[in-house]
Amino acid sequence: MNIFVINSGSSSLKYQIINPDEESVLCKGQVDRIGIGPILIYKYTKDGEKKELEENIQADNHEEALKEVIKKITDPNIGVIKSLDEIHAIGHRVVHGGEVFKESVVIDDQVIEGIKACIPLGPLHNPANLAGITACFDLFPNKKQVAVFDTTFHQSMPEKAFYYGIDKDYYDKYKIRRYGFHGTSYKFITQEVAEKFPDVKKMVVCHLGNGASVCAIDNGKSIDTSMGFTPLEGLMMGTRSGDLDPAIIHFLCKNENISTDEMDSILNKKSGLGAFSKISSDMRDLWGKENEGDARAKLTINLFSYRIMKYIGSYIAALNGVDAVVFTGGIGEKAYYVRERALSGFGYLGLKLDSEKNKACEEVISADDSTVKVLVLGTNEELMIAKETENLTK
């Protein structure tokens, strides 16, 4: 069974064809700069060898981009399937499901209207996600499609965790509350831990990449998470500020004479690691500069790691204890120095790292006598989408 997994952005379309039973990827790729001179990147395996094709294509919208993708995946010379009949169903990443969607769903007209209703909550992402869905309905009229939402995993959060300390009328009127994101990743990691470490029930998971968040999970359910009404809240990230005093926004708008729209762009795109360090938003670049003796790079990494530490500590309290701390995502899986600093404040719990295992990025990096497991696990959101799609379309 092959699942076509689609992740549509405002000017991009990422895709994979996945066999969820074998957990194998037949091909993957992306189309960038849709409508502004797109580039198609197609990665596939032919005759046992991994290959990559990159070329400029003509695509003014997502449907035209998808047509170009279909040409590649069915091309007799470079394709991985003979016809679209070999695709069983299509799974879409949808960023914001609001309170409308509590789980993944097969897409119909009612679901499309529900995704549209969540556009005010996800104005940058949901319209692009809908563009991909609409294009697939036109090009795959007989295939079932499934929407997998970033937010649904966190719908288990209790009221005390998702409300904000503002007039509740704003929730009643605009549904302003904590939603949380990275839910597909957290669900995948939760299942991985349950399979490999069945004794772990309470865990704090740190999904650390260009976008970064932390989640407290108790018996497979999210009870709190650092991202909130939008993905801006929480940890310092590649280009996002994360938590800050809300009064700073008014102060800067007034003193710098900038609009709230400009301020929103600053907080999302011109803050975080890149803006603070004045070096790079890429953790690898910062680590390289720290090793050269750059004080600002070191301070930036310390600031990033310290915020992770604070969230881990607060979520251990929220869980009333913890069995494991789990790291995933590009930074979480590879940056041993971030893990080391983020966990340096938990000796009182008996949490101990094995320095060599941590530097080697092994799966279990806690010391043998540590009272808390520390794990490093790869996430796979696309595989999770494929499995969700398969389960709903069998």
Image: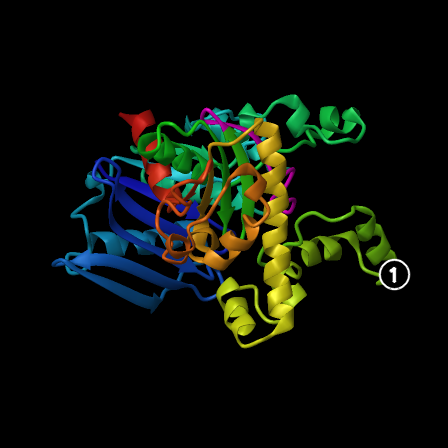
Q: Position of residue 356 (x, y in %)?
A: 38, 56
Work out whether 18 lies above or below 48. Answer: above
Given the current orientation, which residue lies at the most extreme right position?
A: 255
Residue 366, quarter of picture: top left
Residue 219 shown in magenta: yes
Residue 67: image location, x then y, percent: 33, 52
Display colour scheme: rainbow
Q: Examine the rendered structure and indicate whether residue 380 appears above or below residue 301.
A: above
Residue at image location 43% in from the left, 34% down from the top: 187
Q: Which residue lies at the image location 36% right of the left edge and 43% below the top edge?
A: 382
Part of the protein shown in magenta = 218-236
Corner quadrant of residue 55: bottom left
Q: Depth check: give the residue in front, 34 or 20.
A: 20
Q: Pointer 1: residues within 10 angstroms few (<14), some, or many (20+)?
A: few
In the image, is 211 to the left or to the right of 37? right
Question: Could one spot residue 97 in this view of the protein?
Answer: yes
Q: Quadrant of the C terminus?
A: top left
In the rendered image, residue 129, in percent from the top left (x then y), is placed at: 48, 43
Q: Residue drawn 57% across and 43% down? A: 346
- The structure residue drawn at horizontal position 18% and vertical position 48%, both measured from the top left corner, is 81
Side of 220 relative to 100 (left or right) = left
For the residue labelled by badge 1, is the local secondary structure a helix, a strand or a loop? Answer: helix
Q: What residue type is labelled 1?
A: Asn
Q: Nearer the viewer, residue 143 or 162?
A: 162
Residue identifier under label 1: 255
Magenta stretch prevailing secondary structure: loop
Locate the N terminus by quadrant.
Answer: top left
